[in-house]
Amino acid sequence: MCRNHHIYLIIFVFSRTYLYLCKRIYITMTIEELNNKRVAVLLSGGVDSSVVVYELAKLGLHPDCFYIKIGPEEQKEWDCSSEEDLEMATAVAYKYGCKLEVIDCHKEYWDRVTAYTMNKVREGLTPNPDVMCNRLIKFGAFDEKRGHDYDLIATGHYAQTEIDEEGRKWLCTSPDPVKDQTDFLAQIHDWQLKKALFPIGHYMKDEVRQIAEREHLVNAKRKDSQGICFLGKMNYNDYIRRYLGERPGDVVELETGKRIGEHKGLWFHTIGQRKGMGFGGGPWFVVKKDVEQNILYVSHGYDPETAYKKDFAVRDFHWLTRSQETPREVTFKIRHTPEYHPATLEWTGKDSFVLHSKERIHGVAPGQFCVIYDEHHHRCFGSGEITL
């Protein structure tokens, strides 16, 4: 091969590598720009955030890592995995020559996220603590304590971002529909989105595992955490019981008005729930709550008509990024599932609308977040609270 061919080959390989890194890692940010940014990584001890550190390290960066410490309030019987998490995070930070600092957000979590959760369940609603944890803790309390010293905060969320021609930053979905976490990020503030960096958002989960195993990360085979963010092994109902206790009431069959049993508290049940009811002659579905009378209404049979809805109202819609045109034809989801449902929005106010789904949706409950996307479920517009 002649000398010129060698030069062309080198230029070609370099160009392909450079474009690959820009597209695969940050979409809209060049490597040079990233080098001039102060980057903080929220390192949880899990495989996802650990691969985030690797992705940055392979670019020659040594970001500062932070482990957010949260734990149950002095309840040893509510053992969580925070000690193991911190050990894993320490090992990963050391492997890539990064500093690791522990940030105690215990009080902020229990004061803010717990207060939000208990206020909602007390009203008979269905809150989502993980959604508010991102807004109030990971991109909130952390920023107040240390994040304000950094230009970007990198996390292991399965999400992406892009900048449009007008310079606006959008939250975009991950190619992995099962792991996509844009629904959990749909309540963060616009300034938080501007600082957010999701270095593994373009990967499938299997790819992240493969990278972790190839790089011999200590947590490569560690199972993903389950349940509510930061609660560790604590059961969600125990979490609620700790603050609200129990308030027994009647369980009534909706169609007949017949009393079939007793519940321990409306806050232990959600609309559409089928499992864990504990009543004979099932299956039973939770279809309605009467908070004033403390009555839980259920329906007998499989997927009763009352468990489905096509039209419901959404209030206090939180915009991640505002566009000049108000969306009308959209897709949406009301829970963390891979499916996106097509719908039309009938705007009733600046930040409220009635959603008309083109499909019947099971288990629509007041208090849930309805997350709205464009027609191709690529850009996430934001989310609002469902009201019935």
Image (cartoon, helix red, strand yellow):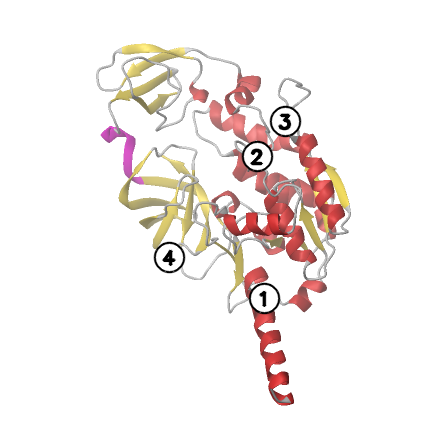
Q: Is residue 63 found left or right of 234 in the rendered image? A: right
Q: Earlier in the sequence, mark 2 or mark 3?
A: 3
Alpha carbon distance from label 2 to label 3 = 11 Å
Where residue 322 appears, as percent x and y from the top left, is: 48, 57
Q: Is residue 316 above or below residue 256?
A: below
Q: Amino acid at mark 2?
A: Cys
Q: Give residue 22's mark.
A: 1
Rendered image quadrant of residue 23 = bottom right
Separation of residues labelled 3 and 1 (CA atoms): 38 Å
In the visual, does 174 lie left or right of 271? right
Residue drawn at x 43%, y 33% is 367
Magenta span:
304-311
Q: Quadrant of the C terminus?
A: top left
**Label 4: how many residues lie within 10 Å, few (<14), some (14-19) or many (20+)?**
few
Say what amino acid the circle numbered 3 marks: Cys
Comparing marks 3 and 4, which lies closer to the viewer?
3
Q: Earlier in the sequence, mark 3 or mark 1?
A: 1
What label sits on residue 229 in the rendered view? 2
**Quarter location, residue 352:** top left
Marks 1 and 4, Cα distance to the nearest angstrom? 23 Å
Residue shown at the point (37%, 18%) measured from the top left: 277
Q: CA distance from mark 3 to mark 4?
A: 39 Å
The label on residue 80 is 3
The residue at which mark 4 appears reads as: 376
